[in-house]
Amino acid sequence: MWKASREQIGTLAKRHVELVNKYRPSCSGFVCNNAKLRKYIVSSAPDKSSARLYDGNIEKIRQGDTGSKQGMKMQRENLSQNTEQSKGVLSNVIVGIVVVVVLVGLIFIVRRNRNQRRDGEK
């Protein structure tokens, strides 16, 4: 494992606090649900006022307070099964027609070749 110096820990804690205070926490399990880590970051951050703001920002998010920002509302989208089924039926009909045309064409070619061989033998 990496043995970080006290200065490196302070720099990392400061950077983390700055990013969370600037962009708000994303609240993954690593950030918001890790109370020991949050306490450690607050105690290791060199600037205590930023550390308190950091802790407050995480608590707001954990409590569900998103501020005055409006969220995006999702709309339910219903896909009609009839549309999907009709597309499937139509494509199956087209494939069937193509197969029949190819078979009729092959039969025509085979008969023509047989007739040409018979005419050549006479």
Image: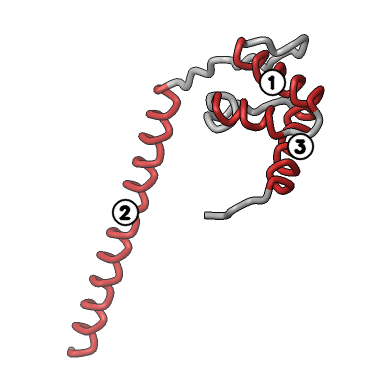
* Label 3 crowd bin: few (<14), some (14–19), many (20+), radius 10 Å: many
Instruction: Find residue 14 and name its label.
Output: 3
Residue 3 in the image: state x and y as whole percent: 59, 53
- First in sequence: mark 3 or mark 2? 3
- Local crowd size for mark 1, using a 10 Å CA cut-off: few (<14), some (14–19), many (≥20): some
For the point 42% across and 29% down, which residue is it? 84
> Which residue is denoted by mark 1 in the rendering?
55
Look at label 1 and name its amino acid. Answer: Asp
Q: Position of residue 106 (x, y in %)?
A: 29, 66
Q: Nearer the viewer, residue 110 or 96?
A: 96
Disc nearest the viewer among 3 and 2:
3
Quadrant of the image for the C terminus?
bottom left
Residue depicted at x 67% and y 10% = 65
Q: Quadrant of residue 116?
A: bottom left
Q: Which residue is mark 2?
A: 99
Quarter-of-image position of residue 109: bottom left
Q: Is residue 40 above or below residue 66?
A: below
Q: Residue at x 76, y 37 (%)?
A: 14
Lateral position of residue 62 relative to residue 70, left or right: left
Helix, strand or loop at label 1? It is helix
Q: At label 3, which amino acid type do we have?
A: Lys
Check disc 3 and report its element: helix, strand or loop. Answer: helix
Q: Residue at left 35%, top 40%? A: 93
Q: Earlier in the sequence, mark 3 or mark 1?
A: 3
What kind of residue is marked 2?
Val
In the image as oriented, which residue stretches furthest toward the front?
6
Q: Secondary structure at mark 2?
A: helix
